[in-house]
Amino acid sequence: RGSCHKPEDVIQRYMEEVAAAPDEDCIICMDQLSSPSSYESPSSEDGGQGILPSAVGKFVKCGHTLHMLCMLAMYNNGTKDGSLQCPSCKTIYGEKTGTQPKGKMEIYSIGQSLPGHPDCGTIHIIYSIPPGIQGPEHPNPGQPFTCRGFPRFCFLPDNHKGRKVLELLKVAWMRRLIFTVGTSSTTGEPDTVVWNNIHHKTEMMSNLSGHGYPDPNYLDNVLSELASQGVTEDCLKA
Ligand code: NAD
Ligand code: ZN
Ligand code: ZN
């Protein structure tokens, strides 16, 4: 899917070239915007012809400016999914996707309620991901990856806000944002499937790990973590 987005087109969809470079530094290369990017203009085969090293672009929504070739290099270093993220303010342009391996997200309900959320019952999410071989989007393509602690069980209160979080988590799952392949910060194991910046509650009736209930701020916190990956209520209306 990434391959149908020409990198230069993605840059030009979300950035406008400015006529005069502002007297500021580029946040990617730290050089002045008035001097050219040190990245080379890609050959036409790379899909980058037309953007010159001197070109300074302005993001259409947030207005931050940087070398267009520096942004192109950052894009080519990532998942190349047709989306951009402003390196200054993290505004997302397009639909950000991640590198979560193939697996299954299942949803059940439990009659028992969570500590801090009495009388509403519980949503039970089960994530299953089997071990496999890393793809080109992973740290060590062609090498195996492991999966520890799967299936992973997660819990949400079955109330209005909890169900909203569930719907957004489904969007995040489809966009491959919930897990990634990397080094576990808990165990130090490399090439393994790890959580990816969207916190989940994996303990239901206790809080021994710090990833349990009660936690009065949890739903708001996870909503803002989802939003910083570009997953917001707008995704549910579309
Ligand atoms: P990690 O250690 O690289 O940490 C990534 C993120 O996950 C961090 O934000 C961290 O705060 C969070 N995190 C750490 N432990 C968590 C937990 N128990 N529940 C929810 N979030 C947690 O991530 P990782 O390696 O994917 O997971 C951390 C550890 O938790 C691993 O050792 C994993 O095997 C274990 N785990 C086990 C189960 C199980 O059902 N047995 C479920 C979840 C996690
Ligand atoms: Zn630059
Ligand atoms: Zn910005």
Image (cartoon, rainbow, N blue to C red):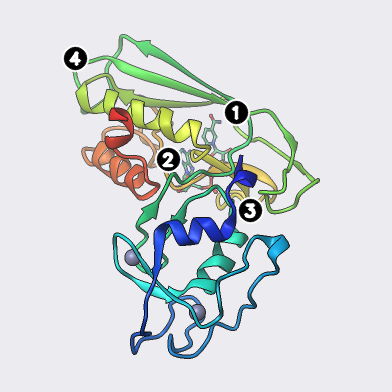
Q: Alpha-carbon distance for marks 3 and 2?
A: 17 Å
The residue drawn where x is 68% and y is 28% is 130
Q: Which image quadrant for residue 194?
A: top right
Nearer to us in this view, 124 or 85: 85
* Element assignment for label 1: loop
Determine whether 35 is above or below 169 in the image. Answer: below
Contact? badges 3 and 2 (CB < 8 Å): no
Q: Is residue 15 above or below residue 236?
A: below
Residue 83: horizontal and vertical position, in percent?
47, 51
Left-right relation of 80 to 234: right
**Residue of label 3:** 188
Q: Which residue is mark 2?
A: 209
Quickly name the residue at label 4: 119
Residue at 69% x, 61% y is 46
The reply to whether the C-beta atoms of the residues labelled 1 and 4 are less than 8 Å apart is no
Residue 132 numbered tag? none
At 48% across and 87% down in the image, what residue appears? 31
Q: Amino acid at mark 2?
A: Ser
**For mark 2, does the 10 Å Cα neighbourhood hold few (<14), some (14 to 19), or many (20 or more) residues?**
few
Q: Is mark 1 within 8 Å of ligand 1?
A: yes
Amino acid type assigned to the residue bearing label 1 in the image: Phe
Residue lying at the far right in this picture: please name it.
142
The answer to whether mark 4 is within 8 Å of ligand 1 is no
Element under label 3? loop
Residue at the spot 44% in from the left edge and 80% down from the top edge? 26
Residue at which label 1 appears: 150
